[in-house]
Image (tube, rainbow, N blue to C red):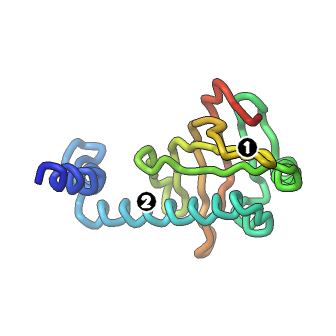
Amino acid sequence: MKIRLIIISMILVPFAMAHAQNNKGGKIPSDEGAKQIELYKEIFKQDSIFFSAFNRCDTLTYRQYLTNDFEFYHDLGGLHYLEEEMQSIREMCQRNSHIRRQLLENTLEVHPLGVDGALEIGVHRFYHTNSGQSEHVSGTYKFIHVWQKKGNVWRISRVISYDHGKMDNN
């Protein structure tokens, strides 16, 4: 019985927190809470599709999720732009190894940026597999994505990837 209560609490607490406060410390009106939950679900879904393309080396789908003025800020690698990002992905996919990304779901935060944007903050783990070897954890890192919605299409315009203390791609 206790385990069942713990599981139910783990499911309901994030939703309760989304409704808990607005900037004035009061209750969020139910329509605001519903909008926040819908935005969270939408960005979670878009993140899943985007990184599924990354994991499968589907560079066409991956590219569709990036704006033309895309910028990637990396604490170790510095700034690079769309063409450098796509070249990096193509090279990664041509190597005789594989990198897989997994979002740590309980770390995901989504915040609205006006009516047509979202800020996604979280932690993700990368796994590396060299030819003939088993998959191993490459590292666990923090990220921020800025999403823009034009029409019904969500795209990432900015990425900040940080806290890369140690990377193990061997």
Residue 33, how many percent across, how many down? 29, 60
* 141, 34: nearer the viewer: 141
Q: Secondary structure at mark 1?
A: strand
* Residue to which mark 2 is pinned: 40
Residue drawn 51% across and 44% down?
Answer: 121
* 150, 34: nearer the viewer: 34
Rendered view: 149 above or below 126: below
* 73, 99: nearer the viewer: 99
Residue drawn 52% across and 41% down?
Answer: 123
* Residue to which mark 1 is pinned: 72
Near mark 2 (Cα within 10 A), the count class, few <14, some 14-19 or many ≥20, is many
**Which label sits on residue 109?**
none
* 117, 58: nearer the viewer: 58
Residue 94, how many percent across, how many down? 88, 55
Residue drawn 61% across and 60% down?
Answer: 148
Q: Is residue 54 left or right of residue 3?
A: right
Number of numbered discs: 2
Rendered view: 134 above or below 46: above
Residue 158, how many percent across, how many down? 67, 48
Rendered view: 19 above or below 133: below
Rendered view: 40 above or below 126: below
Q: Secondary structure at mark 2?
A: helix
Circle 2: residue type: Tyr
Residue drawn 25% across and 47% down?
Answer: 21
